[in-house]
Image (cartoon, rainbow, N blue to C red):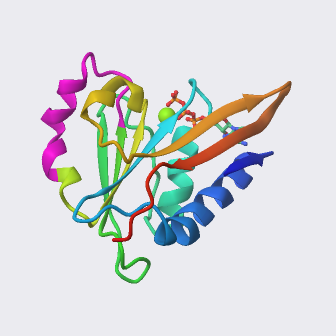
């Protein structure tokens, strides 16, 4: 599905719809974490989308970009969501090679179905990502600097 948002607020709303309505119906992979790759240029809205997802899952406090720390893990209260216990936010921008992601405990993270993993710059680690990655592509549009095209793709539809 391809969406257009006209503001940061609309991107937050789309993120909310994605995680609360779309994700429970689609895209689950048996016995594995749900992994979402966020594609797009600098400033396209990948971290913003993650903030919207975090808010919708009741994560409190600021969600800032893990550009330097590479990875942040937030606990999700059962009160808000029963599918996931943790939101894992990874920014692969600074990784020099795909294998470096293994140092973040990647194997363990992807083997836990209670993890929802959102990863910025997934193309930097593509060889380590599973084939049925959910892809979200962010693009700026025209001259309006608040407009974004956001395409959500789910290659395989499998029930959990
Ligand atoms: N429709 C929109 N959706 C998302 N962000 C928007 C929108 N309109 C304006 N913005 C602004 O664009 C910026 C997006 O920055 P963000 O950090 O989310 O980008 P990013 O894709 O994570 O970049 P990076 O690759 O540097 O991590 C924010 O400052 C946000 O306020
Ligand atoms: Mg970012």
Q: Is residue 47 above or below residue 60?
A: above
Query: Which quadrant: the C terminus?
Result: bottom left
Instruction: Kindly indicate the quadrant of the structure image that contains residue 157.
Output: bottom left
Depth order, front residue of 70/100: 100
Q: Residue at x 67, y 60 (%)?
A: 13
Q: Residue at x 38, y 63 (%)?
A: 28
Q: How many marks?
A: 0
Instruction: Kindly indicate the quadrant of the structure image that contains residue 59.
Output: bottom left
Residue 103 inside the magenta-drawn segment = yes
Q: Position of residue 128 (x, y in %)?
A: 24, 33
Q: Position of residue 108 (x, y in %)?
A: 13, 51
Q: Position of residue 100 (x, y in %)?
A: 19, 26
Residue 45 in view here: no
Depth order, front residue of 86/112: 112
Q: Residue at x 15, y 34 (%)?
A: 102
Which residue in the rendered view is the most extreme toward the right? 143
Q: Is residue 91 left or right of residue 115?
A: right
Q: Position of residue 148 (x, y in %)?
A: 73, 38
Depth order, front residue of 108/13: 108
Q: Is residue 116 above or below residue 47?
A: below
State the extent of the magenta-drawn residues as a range: 91-108
């Amino acid at each position: 599905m391809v969406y257009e948002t006209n503001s940061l607020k609309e991107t937050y709303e789309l993120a909310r719809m994605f995680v609360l309505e779309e994700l429970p119906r689609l895209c689950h992979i048996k016995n594995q974490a749900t992994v979402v790759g966020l594609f797009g240029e600098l400033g396209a809205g990948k971290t913003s989308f993650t903030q919207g997802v975090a808010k919708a899952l009741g994560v409190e406090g600021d969600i800032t970009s893990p550009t330097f720390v590479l990875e942040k893990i937030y606990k999700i209260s059962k009160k808000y969501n029963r599918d996931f216990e943790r939101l894992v936010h990874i920014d692969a921008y600074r990784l020099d090679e795909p294998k470096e992601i293994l140092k973040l405990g990647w194997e363990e993270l992807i083997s836990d179905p209670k993890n929802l993993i959102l990863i910025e710059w997934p193309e930097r680690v593509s060889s380590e990502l599973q084939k049925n990655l959910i892809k979200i592509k962010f693009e700026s549009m025209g001259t309006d600097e608040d407009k974004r095209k956001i395409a959500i793709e789910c290659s395989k539809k499998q029930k959990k």
